Image (spheres, grey):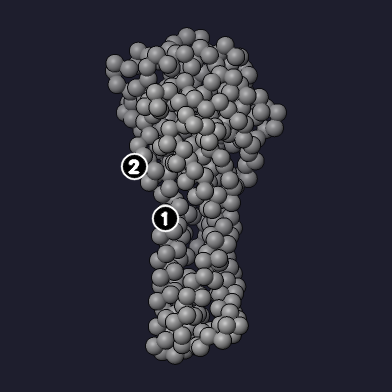
Amino acid sequence: MKNISIIIPSLDPDTRLSGVVESVMEVGFSDIILVDDGSKEENKKYFPVGNGITLLSHPKNLGKGQALKTAIKYVIQNRPDTQGVITCDGDGQHLAKDVLAVGEKMKQTGKFILGVRDFSLPDVPPKSRIGNRISSVALAICSGSYISDTQTGLRAIPSDLLSQMAEIEGERFEYETNVLLSLHSMKAKYEEVKIETVYLDENKGTHFHPVKDTLRIFSRILKYLASSLAAFLTDIILFSICNKALLFGVFASTTIARIVSSAVNFILNKKVVFNSHGSVVKSLLKYYALAIPVMLISAFGVKGICLLLSVPDNSIIITLIKVIVDTVLFIINYNIQKKWIFKK
């Protein structure tokens, strides 16, 4: 383990931090990088010193994500022979044997390794169980990958991913979720390793704020849903006006509504959701290379169902059929946009 660095970010630590450092050194790790993320003066004395321990400091609290990135950048600049890093928490929730297990797995496979907990156990705090289940499902919908413990802080990152990890967005707890959302675009293979579930004093030592940090964690997902909803409402309203009030027919109404709503969706997705800096022209061409087939599938799908069910052209039921068809296309469309059009 000598070429693997242990990264431990900490805010206002207590005596448990020294115990964590001692335990990981006992199982074979010799390079420990601590990050003091703006701790109070009375807590700074709990940061251990000694051979193999490096202490990096933030003058004020910048968040766990920024603390992790500070340490990763330090490793890139100062550990040229590194095989990777392992991030873990300093409150004793990650046992030394589990830290060693994810390190060994990373060395064997060269993959990004997640130390995952079993949330079905009866002693898991409800806040942690519910929050993780929600985030696992949301992540699966938006990334296509199901990860059983999205908020685990025990992660082994191989050296070839460090530079990309240092550039991922997020300053606080949302950074760890953004890492998982970025695995596909980084073409990073990953595996899970089961670890022991440890909660001390009902997890009172956590600096996680349920409402504020959950909103940060889901910010990218919420932005995409808002963008899609704006385009969806534009599409449905224009479709209804053209079909019912102007009597344009299903195909013409779908075409007009989709042209306008797709323009709204493209602008919001590029600028707000995916924050893509790629070529506007190339992105636009790719977007409409996707949007046109989806529009045709939507139009012919709605028309086909209407013919099958003998629904009149100006019936309100057509709008309901369109909602169902476009909901299915919505999920497919998101994944193609993320992985192909706005991947930069």
- Is 122 displayed left or right of 62 in the figure? right
What percent of the width, then of the height, locates residue 308?
61, 83
- Is 129 displayed left or right of 80 in the figure? left
Q: Which residue is mark 2?
A: 212
- The amino acid type of the residue labelled 2 equals Lys
Label 2 element class? helix
- Is 9 displayed left or right of 25 in the figure? left
Looking at the image, is mark 2 or mark 1 nearer the viewer? 2
Q: Nearer the viewer, residue 176 or 76?
A: 176
Q: Which residue is mark 1?
A: 223
Label 1 element class? helix
Q: Nearer the viewer, residue 49 or 10?
A: 10
Q: Is residue 22 above or below residue 243?
A: above
Name the residue: 34% across, 42% down.
212
What percent of the width, then of the height, locates residue 246?
41, 89
- The amino acid type of the residue labelled 1 equals Lys
Q: Is residue 84 above or below residue 218?
A: above
Name the residue: 57% across, 23% down.
99
Instruction: Using a 10 Å C-alpha cutoff, classify the residue at mark 2 as few (fewer than 14 neighbours), some (14 to 19) or many (20 or more).
Output: few
For the residues bearing labels 2 and 1, Cβ distance under 8 angstroms: no
